[in-house]
Image (spheres, rainbow, N blue to C red):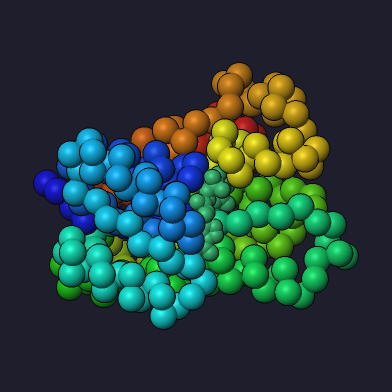
Amino acid sequence: MSRVAVVTGAGSGMGVAISQHFAARGDRVALLDVNGAAVEEVTQRLRDGGAEAISCQVDVSDRRAVFEAIETVRTELGAVEIIVTSAGIEAFVPFLEISPESWERMMAVNLTGTFNCLQAVVPDMLAGGWGRIVTISSSSAQSGTKNMSHYVASKGGVIALTKALAIEYAPHGITVNTIPPGFIETPMAHRPIEAGLLPSMEELIARTPVGRAGTPDDIAAACAFLCSEEAGYITGQLIGVNGGWYL
Ligand SMILES: NC(=O)c1ccc[n+]([C@@H]2O[C@H](COP(=O)([O-])OP(=O)(O)OC[C@H]3O[C@@H](n4cnc5c(N)ncnc54)[C@H](O)[C@@H]3O)[C@@H](O)[C@H]2O)c1
């Protein structure tokens, strides 16, 4: 069955692969990202491959813009049935040097952005009696990690929000799960490695039991399953896609 799926952060990294997986199985996909040029390019590639897909340039922290974008999705593709929230930012700063402004921005994008997107789409899922929600959190919120306390706190909030919504919406046919990725090779992971803020690629791989970096497709495959008909009895779960990291 073709579903209407929204993917945030669809202009780069995991969001691209998640959108591709939904398109490949015949879903109608709305790709949202603050980087309008990047997300339009990804969307055009999906359309060239025969998919029904639209792009929306939107900052997920801008509540009004999110609600307008979702209204466009409804008009052009139909009521939203699936959402994966992959939009996110990271930063590496010792705790005492985090400014109130950068704390607020981290929360605004990673946590309030997730809140905004989910509030915009859940009414469609309630009306349809069916929904699949996957938030992208982070393994760092399970293990803790240094110099990222604002990021880790925002992702801890995403995990808690996911669990709360799973209970609230379970009676309505809506499942809500989170994927806390480990180390996944995307632009977000490459930037701090190149800047010397994370260990080298070789060291990160050596710490990973399966012996390789994760790929965006590893995340997308798990998302596709969690957003399938068959996954209806899985809700409120953290599905680690992390190559076996001990957390
Ligand atoms: N790559 C990893 O190793 C890793 C590990 C754990 C968690 N994550 C999480 O996975 C998610 C995807 O990360 P990625 O590695 O694909 O990163 P990425 O930087 O490649 O992609 C993130 C996308 O989000 C978009 N974005 C950023 N701020 C936005 C905003 N305000 N509104 C809308 N879009 C916005 C960016 O433009 C970008 O296209 C993020 O939430 C990240 O925190 C990544």
In the rendering, at what x and y percent does residue 155 appear? 59, 58
Q: Could you tell me which quadrant the C terminus lies in?
A: top right
Q: Return the residue nearer the eye: 218 or 7.
A: 7
In the rendered image of this protein, does residue 218 appear above or below residue 156? Answer: above
In the image, is 183 to the left or to the right of 76? right
Q: Residue furthest top?
A: 211
| Relative to 105, 34 lies left or right | left
Q: Residue at x 40, y 51 (%)?
A: 39
Residue 242 seen from this side: yes
Residue 229 drawn above or below residue 99: above
Please identify the quarter of the rendering in which residue 190 is found. top right
In the current view of this chain or complex, which residue is farthest to the left?
1
Residue 208 higher or lower than 192, as above or below = above
Query: Looking at the image, which residue is at 50% across and 31% down?
Result: 215
The image position of residue 105, as x and y in percent, is 65, 70
Q: Name the residue: 14% across, 48% down.
A: 2
Question: Which residue, as the protein is rendered here, is positioned at the far right?
Answer: 96
Residue 127 percent coordinates (x, y):
17, 73
Residue 216 placement, left or right of 94: left
- Please count the marks in the image: 0
Q: Nearer the viewer, residue 92 or 59?
A: 59
Q: Position of residue 139 (x, y in %)?
A: 60, 45
In percent of the image, x 27 and y 41: which residue is there? 46
Q: In terms of depth relative to the viewer, which is nearer, 83 or 177?
A: 83
Horizontally, residue 8 falls left or right of residue 203, namely: left
Q: Is residue 79 in view from this perspective? A: no
